[in-house]
Structure formats: C-alpha cells, structure tokens
C-alpha cells in the first residue's frame, strides 16, 4: 500500500513509518519543517513538506493522489495554546479529510484521544480541555463523511516504555496507559483490516496480541 501520514514527524508517526516501511509499504509523511526530513528518511518514509495550517485542500490532495490510505497523526503538541489545538487538532484534521475525499482516498485512520467524545470534566486544565474539544470536533467531522472508510483510534495515556504487543482494543476499554510502540503497531494492523471501518476504538495496554485484537474488533463491526 501507499500510505500518507499527517504529522509525519510525531512520536507515533515515526514508529508507524518504520513498521510500514519494514513490511514493504510505501510511506509518505507530511511535515511542517524541512529540517525534519532526515528523521523521516531514516524511518524509511518519504518526507512531504506541507503546512496543514496554511495549505489549501487542493495542495494537500496533490500529496494524497495515488494513496491507498491516509492517517491523521498530527497534533499541536505540548506547549501549544488553545488556539493551536483548534487550528491543528481540529482544522488540520478536517482539511486532511477534505483532501482525502478530493483525492479519492477512502481509507482514513485518525489518532484521537480517550475522552474526546464527551465534554471535559469540570476542573480540567483549560488548554487540555481545548485539546479534547478539538479532537472531538474533528472526529465528528470525519465520522460524517460517507466518502471515507474511517477508523478513529483513541489511545489512553501514552508512555515511551517498550511495546509489549499486548493490548485491549474495544469500543470502551476504561482508562489506562499504552505505549507509543503499541499504538503504532495497532495503527499498522488497522490499515490492513478494512473491516474496522466505521469503528471508534479505545486502546490501552492489555493481554491480547495486537493482530488478534484488531481481528476481534473487525469481527464486531
């Protein structure tokens, strides 16, 4: 497959690029800064410089032409304020979905966040609350697109511990931690399992091997 990943220099995206390249897929990562290109090349991915905060749908669609799948893994990141949560975590996701539809790319996988589907609890840090609302709005936009075979993945609290290959993946898992390695492994498996289209799935560390967990999620669809 040819897979284009928005947020190609992110911690999960770089892990995903390595996995996809290792299994023989053609991978392109959309990045904002040219100096990030070397890290993508080292991961086996083609760097595509395109700022999703200023690009047009047509600009992004050109980079998606000929792709079999698109993954939205971009984020404003730590240290950014509420305004960029909206322009990146919401608006850029919508732009990427628009571009995928324009380019005829049906398979669309989103890296979201656990809790994005509901109003943040009272007392939530205002910037984190803005992040969750932005993610939730983006997810709702993607789910509304009949032209996309979407899957929304909502990981729990991310860690940099080594991946275990064992997860819990379901419509509702409860709170928990999950390694970035295991998130990348699940994304790679979801891209090979079109029967997970139309599902919003939560992901935490667990006891089920990744491939088995993804097959089970597909069977429930």
Image (cartoon, helix red, strand yellow):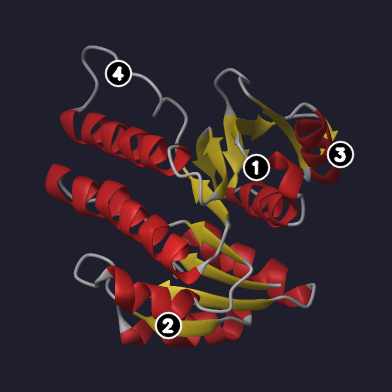
Residue 77 seen anywhere in this rendered image of the structure: no
Identify the secondary structure beneath mark 4.
loop
- 145 left or right of 57 in image: right
Q: Earlier in the sequence, mark 4 or mark 1?
A: 4
- 101 left or right of 21 in image: left
CA gap between label 4 and label 3 equals 32 Å
- Residue 65: x %, y % from top left: 51, 78
Q: Earlier in the sequence, mark 3 or mark 2?
A: 2
- Residue 96: x %, y % from top left: 38, 61
- 75 left or right of 111 in image: left
Q: Earlier in the sequence, mark 4 or mark 3?
A: 4
Q: Earlier in the sequence, mark 4 or mark 2?
A: 2
Residue positioned 41% across, 56% down in the render = 97
CA gap between label 4 and label 2 equals 35 Å
Q: Read off the residue under disc 3.
A: 212
Q: Read off the residue under disc 1.
A: 197
- Residue 127: x %, y % from top left: 19, 36
| Mark 2 vs mark 1: in front | 1
Identify the secondary structure beneath mark 2.
strand
Residue positioned 56% across, 40% down in the render = 153
Residue positioned 20% across, 53% down in the render = 87
Q: Residues within 10 Å of mark 2 (few under 14, many from 20)?
A: many
CA gap between label 3 and label 2 equals 33 Å
Residue 66 seen anywhere in this rendered image of the structure: yes
| Mark 4 vs mark 1: in front | 1
């Amino acid at each position: 497959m040819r897979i284009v990943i928005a947020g190609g220099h992110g911690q999960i995206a770089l892990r995903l690029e390595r996995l996809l390249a290792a299994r023989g897929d053609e991978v392109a990562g959309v990045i904002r800064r040219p100096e990030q290109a070397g890290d993508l090349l080292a991961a086996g991915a083609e760097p595509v410089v395109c700022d999703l905060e200023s690009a047009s749908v047509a600009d992004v669609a050109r980079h998606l032409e000929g792709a079999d799948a698109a993954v939205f893994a971009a984020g404003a990141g730590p240290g950014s304020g509420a305004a960029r949560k909206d322009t990146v975590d919401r608006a850029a996701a919508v732009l990427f979905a628009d571009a995928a539809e324009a380019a005829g790319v049906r398979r669309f996988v989103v890296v979201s966040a656990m809790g994005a589907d509901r109003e943040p609890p009272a007392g939530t840090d205002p910037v984190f609350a803005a992040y969750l609302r932005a993610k939730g709005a983006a997810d709702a936009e993607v789910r509304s697109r009949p032209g996309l075979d979407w899957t929304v993945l909502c990981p729990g609290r991310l860690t940099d511990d080594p991946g275990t290959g064992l997860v819990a993946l379901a419509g509702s898992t409860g709170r928990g931690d999950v390694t970035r390695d295991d998130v990348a492994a699940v994304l790679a498996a979801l891209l090979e399992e079109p029967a997970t289209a139309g599902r919003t799935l939560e992901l935490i560390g667990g006891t089920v091997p990744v491939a088995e967990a993804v097959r089970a999620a597909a069977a429930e669809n």
